[in-house]
Every structure is written in structure tokens, then in C-alpha cells.
Image (tube, coloured by chain):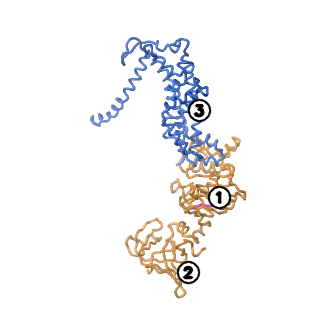
Chain colours: A blue, B orange
Amino acid sequence: MTVRQRLWRGVPYLILVLSVLPIIVGYFWLVLSSFMTRTEGLLPVGNLTLKHWSFLLEPPFGRGYPSIWRVTLNTFLIAAFMTIVVVLVSALTGYALSRLNFPGRKGFLSLTLILHAFPSVTLLIGTFFVLRALNLYNTSLGVGLVMVGFEMPFGIWLMKGFFDGVSWDMERAALIDGASRLQVWWQVILPTIKPGIAALAIFAFISGWNAWLIPKTFTIGAGQQATLSVYLQNFQGETVAVDWGSVTAVGLFQLIPVAIFFIFTQDLLLNIYSGGAKGGA
Amino acid sequence: MKVELENLTKRWGKFVGADGINLAIGDGEFVAFLGPSGCGKTTTLLMVAGIYKPSEGTIRFDGKVVNTVSPKDRNIGMVFQSYALYPHMTVYQNISYPLKLRKMPKRERRERAQDVADMMGIGDLMDRKPAMLSGGQQQRVALGRSLVKEPQLLLFDEPLSNLDARLRLSMRGEIKRLQMELGITSIYVTHDQVEAMTMADRIAVMKDGKLEAYAKPDELYDRPRTLFVAGFVGNPPMNFLKVEVTREDGEYRARAEGIDLLVPAERGEKAVIKGEVIMGIRPEDVSIADGGTQGEIYVVEPLGRDDLVDVRIGDIEIHVLANPTLGTKMGERTSLKFDTKEVQFFDPETEQSLIWN
């Protein structure tokens, strides 16, 4: 290979590295500034310190506010609730939409698509009144249900797509082998679309874990129901100067579980496009 | 188990999948549903399986109406073209799945599955996943799974279509042998007339959702009742030409431009009433020999044992099976001898046989 050819080969890499550089710099700054007393622009000034991480030990806003652990638990519960409900309901709905013929099926399908494209922000005020009427305003359950509702159209479409990819023959074979409809769904179809379920579970969990708008709107301030994102916002109070060091530390703290989650599930996620029905030809 | 279909019909809105199918299958019989794609053979099979509900008509197993019986309670086994193995289960789990659903104890399940797997020659592959098997092995697993619960009726939906030609040939023999040994009543759906002819005791030929013929293979071959059956059964297919049949001096002659043939009296007398008819003659009943009908060789296709020669007599196209040693060449003039002993005549309008109806 001549030098010239070698240089040409490097060009795509150069372009790729340059395009992700801003993001890498961002993460680098995030980590760095959470351990530094101060930063100026992107550059750290001063000494290494752990003081920004003190929120782990004592509530930074005084006794009226929940501790970080309480907030983390809230966030986890909401994310887990969302994952379970979204996956279960989407998997059942998607199966029905993919396999059964019932009146209104077409209409339901288009409606879900429209809802998926619908900007949920515009529904916030209406939802507020519904929640208040149901006595669910300022509760974790209320927040969880609203988030589940907003995630459902996406989940249903994703699951329907995966069910569509499973051959009818496999389902028929299971029925003839002696399975009931529910057994077919649980023992034969669901295991073959595992990558799809994993993907939806991960999306749902992350969207629950990172949710800000809905928890912020349907809970009062940073009270006992606060989630991590809402909690994080307290550091950017309107009256005092923003403590960027603490903001980055809390941000990093919020990032850790998601990163760990990704490390363990990335194989499944990468499988999404190669999964589905094998075995047949 | 005996199977009877009476006026079996399946409609989706205006579309008719199967249209008034009537046929009876004897205990232990091997019946093939033969027809081109979209003829309703799979639809009919799925109604027998209980996957589709008939729009009209009845299905009887041993005299009992099973229209509303669910697939799992029909005690049937089915093999699919796609094999339809469960990709997340091992071979053992695939084969024993029907037994597991019957809540059979684990030890018994293991034994039964092993027996069936050994019979299918896949006893040493029990721990593999389907993705790690060849097409032929997957097919054996699918067969094993359909047999393990000792069904009273076996259904095959084009099971060999995804295999390569050689494997198809050997599996054809194996399935036929297996069916005979086990004596399980079987329905075999295929679009391949060779498969139907070689394997089945009786063949149901279907077209556009209707049953065209239901008879033994040799009867379909020798005594086709419709033009469609005559053209569909037999390889290479029968030659068809428009002729005028006349009676002259006590003899029956079939004439077209450039062709003048003497036909047997018992067949000719049935065609002469109609006059203008469609004549059918199989390629093996035509030969290349001197002193016959003159024509030109259009294409020669060597098949190994024979050459398939396409001869044109004016606008008429005749396929002939010829001995390769004759050295036929494209473009040459040639002469054809017709053996009219097995000649067929069909009504051009109704496409029904003038001889066998």
C-alpha cells in the first residue's frame, strides 16, 4: 500500500472522530468539573475536590427536601413500573393487533400512530385536570401512569412490528401441538421476539429514568415525590448562582445506572435486527 | 382414521378460498392435494387442521363432525414448508413440546422423544438449536415433532419444497415408507405433480378453489376427466392441439393443418359428435420416425436419458421425447409418428373430457 492510499484510508476515520469530538469533550468536562473546585469555560481551575459529591451524604437543601436516596428510589420505582407495564401491555396489544381480526382494528392502528406522533406537551393541562379529579396529582402512581400512557403508542407499534415478523406457520404448529392461544403467546412467540422485548424494556426504562417534564408538572416542587431530573433542577435555582459542580455530579450520578444497564444489554440491543424467526428458511 | 369433507367452503368476504369440496379419505390412506398456487389446497388443509373455520360444509373424523373442535383436540400432526420449528428450543424441546403440553411425565417424554428422533435419524442432535441444523435435519425434526404424539392424522404442507433436489428425492421415499409403516391417514399438499404421483394413494386435483378430480394416480394419468387435469398431471406435459374429428369409410380421423391421424374407433366415435375438439397426446406417444407427419425442429432440450424435442407443424407445437442417439438438430426438418392408442379428446368450451365423462 502506498502512502497516499494509506492517507486516503484514514480520511473516513478523521471525519468520524471530528464529528464525535464535541460529544466526547462534553462528557470529559462533565466528569472533570464534578471533581474540580471550579472550571472556566471548558478548562478546570483550582484543585481536586469531592465537595460536589457531598449530596450523597446530606441533603443539600436542608431538611425539608428528600435525600438523594429517596429521590433515586422514586426514580427507580417509576422507571421499573413503567418498564413492566409498558412491556406487558404493549406485548399483549401488539399481539392482538398483529394476529387477530376484530372490528376497529384498522382505526385503532392509525390512532396509535397519530398518538405516537402527537406532541404530548399539548396534553399536559388536560392531563392535570384528569389526575386531579382522580386524586392522583402529586403521587408517584399518577406520574407513572401518565408516563406509561405517553409511551404506549410507541411500544405497541414496536411490538406489533416484531409479532408481524413471526411466521404464522410457527403459531399454527404450536396450536396443533396442543398449545392454547395464551401458551402460544407466552411459550413460543414471546421467546422468539426476545430482542424486541429487551429493546422496548430498555427504551421504557431509560425514558422513565430520565423523565423530567411529566414528574415536574405533576408533582409539587422537589417534594417527597421528586425524581432525579426534578431534583437536579433544584441546583439551578432562580435566586442563587448555579452550582455547576454539583449539577454535574448529580448528572453523573443519574447517568451511572443507565450506563451499567447498557453494558449488560447491548448484546440484546444489537440483536434487534438479526433476531426474529430463525429455523425456517 | 377416516376423514370426510362435505361441501367444504371457505370465504373471506367475496374471495372464495375453497369452494364446495367433497371428498372422503379412507383409514390409513395417503392422499395428495395437488394444484397450482392459490388453488385452495392449503386453505382446505388448514380447515382440516382446525386453524381456519369453514364458512360452510362439514369435516368429519371417523363420522364425527369436528368443525368446531380446536386444533389441539383433533389429535393431528402437521409438517410445514417452513418447518416452523421453535428457534429458541433445542431439538429435544421441539420434539417433546407436544408431550409437554399434554403434561406427560418428564422421563416418559424423554424416552418417547428419543425413540422418535432415533427413528428419524437425528437422535444425536438432541441438544442443538434449529439454527445449527441443515435444511434436511430441520425437516426431520419437524417430522419427528408431528409424529411424537402418535397422531391419527398427518398433514403435510409442501414439506419438501425448501429442500434441494437430491434431498427431496430421498425424503420423498422416506416419508412414503414411514407413512406406510405407521399406517397413519395422511394428507399431503403439493404443487409438484411428481411428488403427488409418486407418493399418494389418491390425488385430489384442485383448481380455483374447486376439486377438479379425485382419483388414483394412474387413473388421473390415463383417464383425465378435464383438460386441466390432463395438462397438469404428467411430465413433460401433454400436447394439446385443435383438430376436427371426422368419420370416413368406417374410420375416425383427426385433422388439423398439416396433420391427418387415424384414431381408435372407440375414442373417435365420442369426439366425432362434437367435430371440432381439443386433442391431447402425451410426448411419450409421439416419436421421430420416417414417413410420418412433416415438421421442423424448433428446440432440442437434452434431459439425459431422453431429448425433449419441440417440433413445429405449421403453427402447431408438439413436444416429443426422442432418443438422444438420433442426433436431432435445431432447425432441421423431421417426421413424426403419432401413437394414437392413448389419445384424449376434450370439449373446447366446457374443457371436459369427451371420453371419460
Badges 3 and 2: C-beta atoms under 8 Å apart?
Answer: no
Residue B144 in the image, given as x and y percentages of width and height: 62, 49
Q: Are marks 1 and 3 on the same chain?
A: no
- Left or right of B79? Residue B261 is left
Q: Measured from the top left, where is residue A15 in percent x and y?
A: 33, 32
Position of residue B165 relative to residue A158, above or below, is below
For marks 2 and 1, give the one nearer the viewer: 1
Residue in the foreground of this view, choosing between A87 and B143: A87
For label 3, the SS is helix
Magenta region, residue range: B28-34
Q: Where does label 1 land, which residue?
A: B56
Residue A85: mark in rendering:
3
Few, some or many residues within 10 Å of mark 2 (<14, 14–19, 20+): few
Pick the front one: A145 or A171: A145
Q: Label 2 belongs to which residue? A: B273
Q: Which tag, 2 or 1, sits closer to the chain's start? A: 1
Q: Tell me where residue B307 sits by quadrant.
A: bottom left
Mark 1 lies on a secondary structure that is: strand
| Mark seen at residue A185 | none
Q: Which amino acid does label 2 sit on?
A: Ile
